[in-house]
Every structure is written in C-alpha cells, then in structure tokens.
Amino acid sequence: MDIFFTDPSDVPLPPDEVRIREFRADPWPDGRRVKIYLEVTSFQRRPSGEVIVRDAFGNMVANANIIETIDPKMEITMHLRGETPHGIYNATVQLFYIQEIEDEVQEEGTLIRPERIDVDFAETSFEIS
C-alpha cells in the first residue's frame, strides 16, 4: 500500500496511536449545510470514522461514515435534516479501526463479525441562527 504525506517528518503511527488533530464544524451561510473539517495524525493503516450531528434535543440530523481514508485531512459537507435548521448543534466524530480477522478454519455457516476498535473521539458545537 502506498501512502503519500506532504510532511516527511510526520512519522506514520500504528493504529492504537492514531489521534484526531483537529475537528471543526462551520455552518454554511444558507443554514442548511455544515462543513466538517477533520485532521488526524499520520497513519500506517487507514482509519475509518463516523461523524454525527445532533440538534439541541439530541436528535440526529446528519451523519457520515468515513471508510479507510487515504488522506489525513478531510472536508465533508453535511446536509442538515429538518424543515428550518436553527439553534445549537453538536457534532461528534469517532475514529476507529476494524480488527483484521486471520484466516482460520471455521465451522460451516459460522459468521464472524470483525470487532470495531475505537481509537479517538472529538466533539464540537456550532450555531445556526
């Protein structure tokens, strides 16, 4: 696997050491969308993530899944559900890896579900008036 980084001094880290460097949510002027900015440390294995935006009542109004990103810097535009978004919102991101399953002899019909290993979490709030 080839991974390209702009800073050669930024040493790629193993999965259990990967962390979120920056997490920010900036609402668009139209009040219907929010730009999510996420930056993580350099990595040896590509991490996944889950971004959730909730309104002041705790209702999920947007969500996005990041599957094995190749870039440590990400920008995502999320559309907010609901008639007229306004008020305080909370955005969270959970960074994780899916445990690799080694090839083993299994009983026929047995389903092995890989384990999700959470490595970092961040949250931020923003307001739409």
Image (cartoon, rainbow, N blue to C red):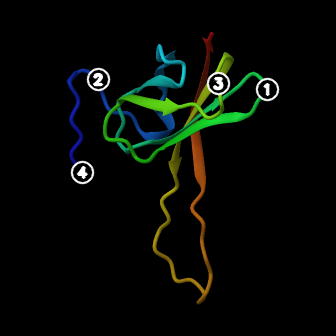
- First in sequence: mark 1 vs mark 3: 1
Q: Which residue is mark 4?
A: 1
The residue sitting at the right extreme is: 57
Residue sitting at x 35%, y 30%: 72
- Left or right, 16 with respect to 58, comes to left
Give, as a three-letter code, the residue at label 3.
Thr
Q: Earlier in the sequence, mark 2 or mark 4?
A: 4
The residue singled out by tag 2 in the image is 10
Question: Which numbered disc flags the more N-terminal residue, 3 or 4?
Answer: 4
Q: Are marks 4 and 1 in contact (CB under 8 Å)?
A: no
* Residue holding disc 3: 84
The reply, left or right, for residue 47 in relation to residue 79 is left
The Cα–Cα distance between marks 2 and 3, rounded to whole angstroms, is 43 Å
Q: Residues within 10 Å of mark 1 (few under 14, many from 20)?
A: few
Q: Marks 3 and 4, how far apart in space? A: 45 Å
Q: Mark 4 and mark 1: span between their CA atoms? A: 43 Å
Residue 20's x, y, as percent?
49, 25
Q: Looking at the image, which is closer to me, 58 or 109?
A: 58
How far across and how far down the image is residue 2, in percent? 21, 46
Q: Which residue is mark 1?
A: 57
Q: Secondary structure at mark 3?
A: loop
Question: If you read the primary sequence from the N terminus, does the residue marked by circle 1 or circle 2 appear first?
Answer: 2
